[in-house]
Image (cartoon, grey):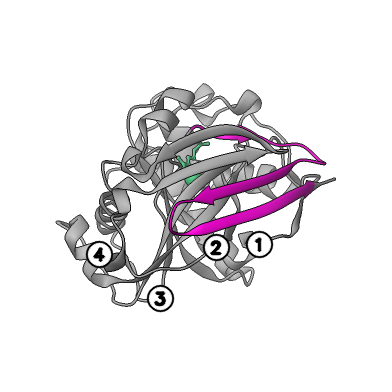
Amino acid sequence: MKTTLNREAIIRLCERVEGAQTRAYAIPKLTDEYPSMTMADGYAIQTELRKRFIEQGHKLVGWKAGLTSRAKMKQMGVDQPSIGFLTDKMSRPENSVISTSDLVHPRVECEIAFVTRERLVGPGCTAEDVLQATDYVLPAIEVIDSRFSGFKFDLESVVADNGSSARFVGGGRPRYVDELDLPTIGAVLEKNGEIVEMGAAAAVMDHPAAAVAMLVNILAEMGEELPAGSFVMSGGITAAVAVSPGDHVIARFQELGSISVRFGE
Ligand code: OOG
Ligand code: MG
């Protein structure tokens, strides 16, 4: 991947995103200052952020594909998927209360997550390769939180902001993929007892494993691979739903059980 920003600008923008993420405030999208910034620049900033968090003792537990369904692309006004990294500090247990005071404007998504038992290396990784390397799948709720004002961004900016990654909750009923017809799995998202979104896993690139393959191929462009034992989210099936303190969210998945979380101050 070819970057256009110099090292100094990448560090400065990384520090800007890191400040907004760790202190939960909104910033203007990065392309306001650097209109010709590219996706490669976005990934260079994200990589810098990942290295910093790891240096601070955060553990890399996996990756996420984002903007992989038409519902998500339409909601955010973009036309391409992206990837981001996941650390232990972002993980929250099922049935927990997730605090919102350390988030800017959280939204929830329902996703299928994969746990791998073999490493995956691109380029040329396919959905079949992913299914072959998968130990099991499980449902997940992702809590995304763009650090950009009004949750408005372009791809270059959101990639730098680690794909809006904030919190994630894996749970429900883990299953082996060969026991499921993954694309036809339905998901219903409820907020405070009302159904707010619904869809099927096929909304994610016709098969969520295709989104994981796409992720592995982007990793390859960054000179990285997906190690065995990774937790990988394949992307929101439906549009994301805003949450505030007091909200109770349940994501119900056909065959995979459900995940419940509450939001607090
Ligand atoms: C970008 C993150 C998208 C997904 O599952 O599509 C994402 C955003 O919408 O802020 O996590
Ligand atoms: Mg997501």
Q: Magenta span covers which residues?
A: 239-263
**Disc 3: which residue:** 229
- Tell us which disc is closer to us: 3 or 4: 4
Question: Circle 2: is it few (<14), some (14-19), or many (20+) Cα within 10 Å?
Answer: some
Q: Kindly report the distance in space between the C-alpha atoms of the residues bearing marks 3 and 1.
A: 20 Å
Number of disc labels: 4
**Disc 4: which residue:** 131
Q: Could you tell me which secondary element the residue under label 3 belongs to?
A: loop
- Tell us which disc is closer to us: 2 or 3: 2
Report if residue 249 is visible in the image.
Answer: yes
Check disc 1 and give the amino acid type: Glu
Q: Earlier in the sequence, mark 3 or mark 1?
A: 1
Q: Could you tell me which secondary element the residue under label 4 belongs to?
A: helix
**Disc 2: which residue:** 172
- Label 1 near label 3: C-beta < 8 Å? no
- Tell us which disc is closer to us: 2 or 1: 2
Q: Which mark is residue 190?
A: none
90 left or right, relative to 95: left
**Disc 1: which residue:** 94
- Label 2 near label 4: C-beta < 8 Å? no
Q: Kindly report the distance in space between the C-alpha atoms of the residues bearing marks 2 and 3.
A: 19 Å
Is the CB of the residue bearing disc 2 within 8 angstroms of ligand 2?
no
Percent position of residue 251, x then y? 57, 48
